[in-house]
Image (tube, rainbow, N blue to C red):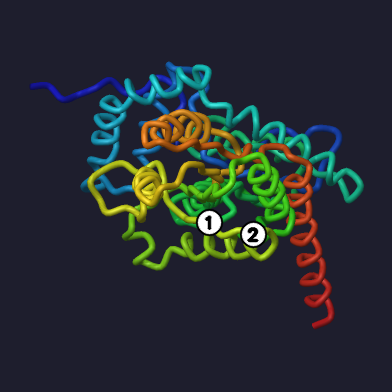
Amino acid sequence: MNFSLPPPTIPHLNRHAAMNKQPAREQQTISTGILLLNLGGPETLKDVEPFLYNLFSDRQIIRLGPFFLQKFIARRIASKRAPQSRANYAKIGGGSPILAITKKQAQALTRALADHGDYMVLPCMRYWPPFADECIDRLLAAGVSRLIALPLYPHYSVATTGSSLVDLENVLARITNPPSLAIIRSWPTQPGYIKALCKRITEGMARSAEQTELVYSAHSLPRQFIDDGDPYVDELKQTITAIEAKTGIQGHLCFQSRSGPVRWLEPSTPDMLRTLAGKGCKSILMVPLSFVSDHVETLYEIDILYRRMARDLGMELRSTPGLNDDPLFIQGLADLILKQEKQAATQAHNTLQQ
């Protein structure tokens, strides 16, 4: 049996261009570039399989046998999973909206920072264009000398923020005289983020039936990550504590989007639904806690799959809207940037005084 498959013919990981020669600078220079780091997603149904290939090729999040077999096994997995994934994306319009949403976030953040300096804000995706090398090319052409990496993952994990930062740093390492890089590692209790979530929760609970249970659904991880010291779950709990201090409403944490034979974080979202149904629950308000941009996890898994499952269990499930480019959330991102800038200025001042 021949197991070979043709290589992907559309954008994939490790396509970094040779960057020792910097592009020509544009006339108007901007000193600081901001990269909004995110997962990325297939924009069309044809993109689904190569997107999955990119995802499973990343040894930062999953090791598929020896190094030299990673891409071969990734291609097999992508081919096997693509039909079901394409069906899921077809149900939400034929592709992921995450790039369009991240572009709106970048535009809104640029406006929010307009009175504080000249910033160039770009989406920077991990598994589908625009990749880090393309983004760096654009920033260098604009004359940027300083970079701020702002992950759109509030809670740090090696599988999300960690992987994106490794990829970004690898690109910068290929550049002669690269711009400086400042990293905003995570922001689980950022006030604007918490305020935006609280607003959605209080509004959602006000429209829900009495005795509605609040459920926080976060993206799952293999349990081994946490055992190895990943702070993801601890930071999720920090977010929930901050929310409950403001709303006075207690909720249940569970984890979605698990796949594969390893041990995952528990309880899973389907298990949580079954548990609540067994206790006589009739109404659920679900909060997509670790997702700040609508994607297949919110638009399909929560709004279609889990809603249907809840209905079959005799419950009504509603969900809070994605944060996307909500002004409260965007101001929170702007505050993160301004805090980073203030810290950098203070550090520079202290260095000069020494």
Foreground pick, 350 / 153: 153
- The answer to whether 262 is drawn above or below residue 188 in the figure is above
**Percent coordinates x, y for residue 14 in the rendering:** 44, 37
Residue 344 visible to the viewer: yes
Foreground pick, 185 / 317: 317
Q: Amino acid at mark 1?
A: Gly
Return the residue found at the far left. Answer: 1
Contact between marks 1 and 2 (CB within 8 A): the answer is yes
Residue 60 visible to the viewer: no
Q: Which mark is residue 243?
A: 2
Q: Which mark is residue 191?
A: none
Going 52% across and 58% down the picture, which residue do you hit?
156
Image-based side of 44 in relation to 68, left or right: right
**Cα distance between the residues tagged 1 and 2:** 10 Å
Q: Which mark is residue 251?
A: 1
In what element is the residue under mark 2?
helix
